[in-house]
Image (cartoon, helix red, strand yellow):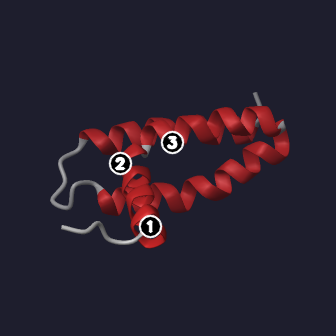
Amino acid sequence: MNMSLIAAFVWVIAANVLAMLPSNDNLWRRAYVLIAIGVPLLGWVTYENGPWIGLLCLAAGFSILRWPLRYLGRWVKRKTVGEPAE
């Protein structure tokens, strides 16, 4: 196992430990830090191990950071489709 996969594994463990700690802001600050660290890490993993391993790590990141992705999807939909009529 090379260093990029070890770093990705450490990122996953750190994300799980951070998710278990109590937070006043619903873990958003931690999610921003994990995203900022995870994006270059994902590029490194993909560069060293190929696109299939990179896609597996991307799926792992998506499963860990699912709430920020849901809010991003809702925001994009709201910006492209527009506000729903009430």
63 on left or right of 54: left
**What amino acid type is highlighted by mark number 1?**
Val
- Estimate the x, y position of residue 66 in percent, counting from the top left: 41, 44
Three-letter code for the amino acid on which mark 2 is drawn: Trp
Secondary structure state at the residue bearing disc 2: helix
Image quarter in which the N terminus is found: top right
Which label is found at residue 71? none
Closest to the observer, 6 or 50: 50
Name the quadrant containing residue 45.
top right
Location of residue 82 by image quarter? bottom left
Kindly identify which residue carries mark 3: 62
Q: CA distance from mark 2 to mark 3?
A: 9 Å
Q: Based on the displayed image, in which of its 4 quarters is residue 71 positioned?
A: bottom left
Where 56 falls versus 36 (above or below)? above
List x then y, in percent, for residue 14: 43, 42
The secondary element bearing badge 1 is classed as helix
Q: Residue at x 34, y 38 (%)?
A: 17
Name the residue at 20% across, 61% down. 25
Q: Earlier in the sequence, mark 2 or mark 3?
A: 3
Secondary-structure class at tag 3: helix
